[in-house]
Image (cartoon, helix red, strand yellow):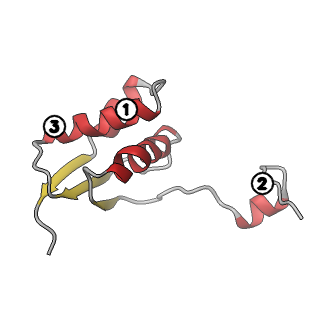
Amino acid sequence: MSLIFSERNSLYTDRVKPFAAPSPFSFVLLGASGNLAKLKLYPALYILALKKRFPAQYVIVGYGRTAFDEAGFRALVEESVRAQLPEAYKKVLEEFLTHFQDVQEQYY
């Protein structure tokens, strides 16, 4: 049996709800300079921002061993998004990047 998920399908409207964060939040990403973050997580987070699924106030904190300044970390995120989604909207991406902060520490 195959399930088709569409907005017209009651299964979609009853059980599968689109993600949307209703209030401010902090998202801590461990391994912020890692391959998984660059290939999958940053582009996926950008798509959520593009679809306006984040509230106006949120922060994404990248935690990792690699030392970055704020501009360097945001450049890493931008390069990651553009590598996977070359058609990324400049205005949306610039606003999205303002929500990123980096923390450099060793894992214990």
Measure the alpha-carbon separation of dots 3 and 2: 40 Å
Residue at the spot of label 2: 5
Marking on residue 59:
none
State the image coordinates of residue 102 (x, y, percent, origin top left): 17, 51
* Quarter occupied by residue 68: top left
Q: Is residue 84 above or below residue 23?
A: above
Look at the image and tell me in which quarter the C terminus lies: bottom left
Identify which residue is drawn at 40% across, 31% down.
83
Q: Is residue 6 above or below residue 30?
A: above
Density class for disc 3 (Cα within 10 Å; few <14, some 14-19, many ≥20) is: few
Q: Earlier in the sequence, mark 3 or mark 2?
A: 2
In front here: 107 or 88? 107
Q: Earlier in the sequence, mark 1 or mark 2?
A: 2
Q: Is residue 45 left or right of residue 105?
A: right
Residue at the spot of label 1: 93
State the image coordinates of residue 90 (x, y, percent, origin top left): 38, 24
Identify which residue is drawn at 49% across, 41% down.
47
